[in-house]
Structures are given as C-alpha cells and as structure tokens.
Image (tube, rainbow, N blue to C red):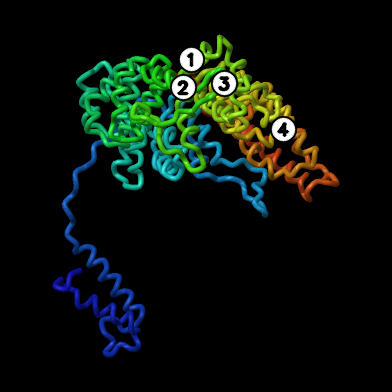
Amino acid sequence: MDKGDEGYGEWEELVATALLGTERRRGGGPAGSPEALLDAAAVHAVRRRAGLRPAEAGPRPDPAPRDPRPAPPEAAGRRLAQLLAGRSGPVNGGGRRGSAPDLTELLPQWLAAAARHGYRSPAALVPALLDAARARTDLRPQALALAGTRGLWLARMNPDWRFALRGGSGGAGELPAVTDRAAVERLWQEGLFAERVALLGAVRAHEAAAAPRLLTTTWATERAEDRLMFLDSLRVGLSGDDEPFLEAALGDRSRNVRATAAELLSALPTSALAGRMAERALACVGPEGVTPPAECDAGMLRDGVVKRPPAGRGERAWWLGQLVEAAPLSCWRERFGGLDPAEIVALPVAVGDGWTEELHAAWCRAAVRQRDAPWSRALLGPASAPPAAGPGTASLAERAKLLETLPHAERAEWVAEFIRAHGLSEAFQLLGVCVVPWAGALGRAVVDALDTARDAGSYPWSFSGVMGLAERCLDPAEANRLEALTTAVEDLPDAAPGAAAYWAEAFQRLVSTLRLRATMLAELTPARPLPDRGLVSA
C-alpha cells in the first residue's frame, strides 16, 4: 500500500497500536482492545487485498509435448514414489544401518529397469524425479530420460531445474526423423543443448559418418566445452570415417579438444596419427632395450603429446609413456620377432634401466584405449597370482580397466577366481566392473567369502563397502542361500565385541534387499509384452 492510497493512515495507526499495546495507546485509537485491534486488522487486510489491481496475465505456456511411451504399472509407480522419498530403515547407534534396505540405493536400478521396458515417468512424479536428479548427478542421465518431454517442459519454468536443459540426451524430447534433413538441420541450428546432443546421438546411430558432417556445419561457432562434449560422443561407433574430422580437430584452439581428438585417433589402429605414434614408439622400444625420446618436438605436440609432466615424473619417461599408449598394439608383434602379447609382456625388457614398469603401464593404457582383449589378458595374468606379482600392473584400478575389455562371462570368472584366492579385501574395484546381477560362480564366490570373513572373526565394518555393493549387485536368487547366515551367533574369542550381531544384521539387510529387488523388478514387468522399441539391455 502506497502512502497516497486511501486507508494508509488508518493502517499505520493500527500498526502503531499493535507495537505500543492497546492499553498504552492514548485515546484508544481505532481499536480500544486487543480483540478489536485484531478485528480491525483483519478487515483492513481484506480491504488491502481486494483493492489491488490485478496484473496483466502472462501468456499461457504451451502444453507439454506428448510422450508416447507407456507409464509403468501402478505398483511400479507407487514403488518409484517410495524410492524418491528415500524412506529407509532407521540407523542404529554407532552409525550402523540396521537391517532395513536402503531405498535410495535401489533407485538407480529401478530407473535402469524402467528404461529397458521403455517406460516414461508417471506425470505426478516428474517434479520429484527432477529434484532427485538435481541432488544426485549420478542419477541424471536415467532420471532425465524417464522424465522425458514433460521433464524438459517443466525445467524451462523452474530455475532449479535448468540443469536438465544441458543434461545430455535425457529429457531431450521427441526428435525428428533422422531422414528428415530439413528438420534435423533446423533442430541442430536452433535446439537446446540437450536436444542437440540427443539429435547427434540419433544421427550417429542411423549413419555413423553423418555425425561428423553435422558437427562440421557449426563447429567453428560452438563453445569449447560444447565442442568437447560433441567430440566425446563420437566414441560410440568410432571408425575410420571419422578420421578426417578428428585430424582437423588436432588443430583446435582448445587444448582439451586437441587431446580428445588425439586419443580418439589413437584408438583407430589404421589412422595416420596411430602410424606416426607407432613409428616414434618403435624407435624407442625393442628387444635390445628402451631409449626414451630426448625431446618433445612440434609434431609430437600436434599429435597430442603433453610436454610438461605431472609432479614427480621425469620428462623422458612421461613422453615415452604417451608414445607407447598411443601406438597400435599390433605393431609390437613384428618388433619382437612374432611373439604374442603374453610372451612380449613376460620379456625382461630393459630391467637394468628401470623402464619395464613404465613400459607395462603404457601398454595397459593402450589395451584399455584400443579395447584389446588378448593384450588385456596378458597384462592381467592369472587371477590366482599375488596382485604385486602381476605381469602388467599391480594397481587394482588399472586391472579393473583391463577387465572391462574382456567379455562379461570371462570377466566374472576372473574376479571370482581372484576372490577365491585373495578374499574380498582387495576385490572392491574389480567387482565394480562386473555385469549385474552377479550370477553363477561370481555370486557364489562373494557369498562364500563373506561367510568366511565372518567365521574368521574379521571386523565386519571393514566389509561394509562390499556388503553395500552386494545389496545392489547380487542375483536376488541368492537370498535363499543367504538366509542361513542371518542368525546371530556368539562372538568368537578373538573377534571384536558385538561383531557376530553386526554380521547377522548385515546379512539380514542383504537378504531383505535382495527380496525387495526381486519384487521391484517383478512390478516393472508389464502384464503383456510392450512393443519392441529397439532398446538395448544395460
């Protein structure tokens, strides 16, 4: 209310009376008692609101685009609401989680299963889904994909959800047919970033070579961070057809873009960059020993070699590693007289000069980059061997990366053998790269190792990470076999006090979580088969 408005003075008088008190206000004012003061204030408040002139109505937003995907079954929708609310069992004293499942950790699996079935989010849950994606970046791709067109529509109206507009393909809306060149060009030129990323992925899936052609039309005007993300999307379906575009990107003004282009080219064994790197690497490494490069010349810089090493690394060792990891692994067979990868790795190359560890680490990175399973097997060695005696690397993080190049079944068997030989204490990172659910030998190895750790009186909380991973990854069919482990027994003489009860509680939570996962997946199964949408199982 402005000072010139009618009734302003009376309102000020009411405020003054309320501040001083009706008994202290001389003359009683407009309200001589507390009751009268409140009545007068109520009347005046209604009068003030009624007297406001309504603002001009803004334009009504367009309706949300139609999402043709089906909603999940009703029971699955209720489960999603429960998971988004994150209602879990109480945490006991001392940080113990109790025996109830942690619902928030089941949300990613629900989203992944819903994506496999081709569902959209129930409309009423889209706001909560966007809030969850805002709070947890690990949920964003799947959450935004489930939210779909309605999620993107809502994100334009709420600043808290603006992240969804640059959140990749999730929530990008309905795309034009990739064969409609005019519509593709229009969306590529005018669309939101999320829509453009999704469009690029769709074009790439339809015709791999069309993606770099589309990128070329706007490349010079894109922001550096956008160029980097667009370039990174070429990892899917990477082929020799991408080489001209990537070779040109070696001259990009952004150092990160240049480095990514070089990395992608080195993953193409027949590319010109891979050939140049092979020539340099072969000049440095052979049966006679290792001679690292003496300098980092202009050609090496253009091909993505970083000149300045990180702290603690020597320049020549740093340059050598970059050359070897970018060279095609196929070039080493001839250089070492026709030996296979296992035989090459076993050679005591330049042990006296101290280059073996540097060379093997670079070969590990090359095997991961080039997805070369034979070299990965050679560098991993037998799972039963002590980790420190690994032929390629003792690093469990590097071993996990090498395992990812192997077929799923072989990967699971290797990790199961590792657990049987070495237990669970060093297996956490390796388990993280195994396909879910852990079935067969791997699931049995994990359960047996947990049981062995309990019987040995080990500290139970030292296995909390593996136990949490097991809750998310074990095959739900293991629940019945685990039932026998849920009964508390007396503490062993050398065990930590209360360890037996903790183990029983942890196994109870594991069993209840596995059964909840089984129920959750069953709820998502449609009553009748859905039409094939070309979805790829995770």
Q: Is residue 105 above or below residue 346?
A: below
Give the Cα separation between the discs numbered 2 and 3: 19 Å
Q: Amino acid at mark 1?
A: Cys
- Would you say 317 lies left or right of 440 here? left
Q: Are marks 2 and 3 in contact (CB under 8 Å)?
A: no
Q: Earlier in the sequence, mark 2 or mark 1?
A: 2
Q: Earlier in the sequence, mark 2 or mark 4?
A: 2
Describe the element under mark 1 as helix, strand or loop. Answer: helix
Give the Cα separation between the discs numbered 1 and 3: 16 Å
Describe the element under mark 3 as helix, strand or loop. Answer: helix
Residue ID for mark 2 = 281
Give the Cα separation between the discs numbered 2 and 4: 39 Å
Q: Is residue 448 visible?
A: yes
Q: Earlier in the sequence, mark 2 or mark 3?
A: 2
Describe the element under mark 2 as helix, strand or loop. Answer: helix
Residue ID for mark 3 = 376
Closer to the eye: label 3 or 4: 3
Residue shown at 34% from the left, 82% from the top: 33
450 or 524: which is nearer to us?
450
Quarter in which the N terminus is drawn: bottom left
Residue ID for mark 4 = 423
Q: Quarter-wise, where is residue 214 in the image?
A: top left
Residue 331: assigned label: 1
- Would you say 501 lies left or right of 432 here? right
Badge 2: few (under 14), some or many (20 or more) residues near its Cα, within 10 Å?
many
Give the Cα separation between the discs numbered 3 and 4: 22 Å
Q: Are marks 2 and 4 in contact (CB under 8 Å)?
A: no
Q: Is residue 68 above or below residue 255?
A: above
Q: Amino acid at mark 2?
A: Ala
Q: Are marks 3 and 4 in contact (CB under 8 Å)?
A: no
Q: Quarter-wise, where is residue 213 in the image?
A: top left
Q: Are marks 2 and 1 in contact (CB under 8 Å)?
A: yes
